[in-house]
Amino acid sequence: MSWTNNRAGRLVSGLAPLLLPYLVLFCGGIMLTICQSFGVFTPLPHAGAALDAYAKILTDPAFFSSFGFSLGVAMVSAFCTMAAGTFLAYQVWQLPAKLATAALIYKIPLILPHISVAFVVLVFWSPSGIVASIAHSLGIIQTMQDFPNILYSGWGLGMVLAYTLKGTPFAMLLVLALLVRFDVRQIQTAAMLGASGVRIFFSIVLPRMAPAMHTSFIILFLYGFGAFDIPFVLGESRPGMLSIHVYNLYFKHDLARRPEAMAILTMMFFFAVIFIIAYSKTVQRLENGVRKL
Amino acid sequence: MDLAVRSVSKRYKNHTIIEDISFDVGPRELVSIVGPSGVGKTTLLKIIACLDTPDTGRVIYSEPLSKKHPVIIVFQDYVLFPSMTVKDNVGFGLKARHMKKKQITEQVDRMLVYFQLTRQAEQYPAQLSAGQKQRVAIARAMIVNPAVLLLDEPFANLDRNLKMETARFIRSTQQEFGIPTISVTHDLEEAFAMSDRIGILLDKRLQQFDTPRQVYFNSVSRKVAQFLGPVNLIPEQHLSLFQGSRDPAAPASDKPVMARPENLVMTEDANGSGRIADKTFAGHYTVYSVAIESHAYTVYSQDDRFAVGAQVNLQITPY
């Protein structure tokens, strides 16, 4: 028994450099956020009831439109990123060895900060941007106003573009990690049996890539749902992204509204947890059998 | 459908893999190419399957290959589709041909019954034994009525006691479906048991291509004979000591005569030219080592009564 205790003690002390920051920063941060959402440990003494902030948010239509908009932008951008990443990873995987090495260029957006990617999108797609200039030079548009309002159309397209550009190499990285261990003879066998390229992709290759696709979708969706930097540069105000809503409540309003900001953050956190559980369960049910590999 | 392999050679990075390989496979024929590991058997198979191209030579099919009548290779580790059930694996080729669902179900069910896989229909490859996986792979290939079936080391992943049973099963299946089949293997016994003809691939070349009996008992060279199993090399000066071994009309030769241990018969004789030097029990036969002068000859016999030290005469019996 003492041997077991000693071993567990050694393990905990060995992991302490990782566990301590996790406990203090992450768990502590979550706890403080939850507490402040109930009006506890707030900068100003909270006069109302514990659930006042939640009541106020949940009766505010602006919150729901922001929530829906954030959900939509995150969903579309995660899906586009995953689809683009998967398709490109499959193409890169099929390249001859020499070209595949050159294709490592795809990793460049990985090292760029999100804010830089937001500015890249802005520089290219704004009405005074590079694409508009090229269109003007080619005579496709006459004035800036003729260029479609892609970035601020009310659909969050600018953010979707930025998330897709930034996230695609990440999705490719995950998918390629699986593909390098994929047995090419499965494709040869399917082709010998008469399958077309499309059938081979959807029946043979896609199931193999699915775990990486699901992982990248979850990560990209949750990032897109809660991130601040890209919406700060490319976001719109009506409706705005939830992260911007929280930022405004936290920094631009009365300190008395701090519990509302924290209540939104708390709800976003629990939404993320529920989303991960629900998604994983769904995937597990759909892939029953494949998981037995 | 029949096919002819003509002068096929293949090199990788200045290293010759196979050289000047030629043989024919007739319709309904099962041919095995045997050789040690790394001799280029799989390369040859890939060339026949059009998965690789020869540097010289060509493979000629009596009818042009098509999507409807393809060449199908069953790989050594079967390469089943892991995300599909046995049923879906077997029916994959029919789905790829856009066949109606009802027809697919009927054909797949028939195949599963023939290959004794009905109980495994809903299982995934990871849940099957090696033997079951192989049957799924062959069923998946057979269901599309291939022009030629290629088997890459069909016995490599099987238990020893399952190999011969599988060889017989492959033979009967091939006869039933009437599909020309080429198998590459280094399992000799199984190749002998199931093949109409056998090719011996040694030193990058096809050394002999003939019926199993002919290849085994009338090997073209000492190397081929020794690859196929133990062989006694009887020098010219000893031939007179082997009763019935010399055709009086045959011209004398310096080359030793090759005789398999099972072709030598012993008879006890106090004045015999040989003496039993050793005796080993090997299950369904006994291995004797018979010394004649300075030479030792190996004899397989089902008769266990000979004692070590006994004087015997040896006789070569034709197979």
Image: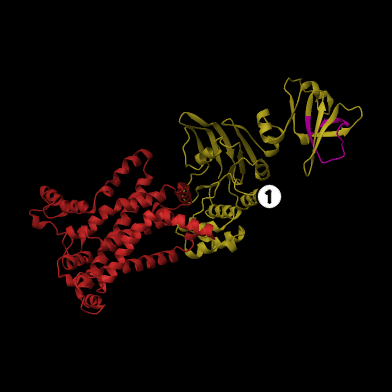
Q: From the viewer's perspective, is residue A131 above or below residue A256?
A: above
Quarter occupied by residue B274: top right
Residue count near mark 1 (Cα–Cα under 10 Å), binned few <14, some 14–19, many ≥20:
few
Left or right: B311, with B138 as reference point: right
Chain corresponding to yellow in the figure = B
Q: Is residue B34 above or below residue A73?
A: above
Left/right placement of residue B34 relative to residue B298 reads left
Q: Position of A138 compared to B86: left or right?
A: left
Q: Please identify the quarter of the rendering in which residue B222 is found.
A: top right
- Answer whether residue A217 is visible to the viewer in this image: no
Q: Secondary structure at mark 1?
A: helix
Give B123 or A23, whichever is nearer the viewer.
Answer: A23
For this rendering, which residue is in front, A122 or B318?
Answer: A122
Q: Is residue A21 visible?
A: yes
Chain A: colour as depicted: red
The residue sitting at 35% across, 69% down in the picture is A274
Q: Which residue is mark 1?
A: B161
Furthest residue to the left? A143
User: x%, y% of residue A68?
Assistant: 25, 69
**Closest to the observer, A293 or B169:** A293
> Image height check: is B89 above or below B298?
below
Residue furthest out toward the bottom? A49
Q: Amino acid at mark 1?
A: Asn
Q: Which residues are magenta?
A: B297-319
> Magenta stretch: residue B232 in it?
no
The residue at the point 59 percent across, 54 percent down is B135
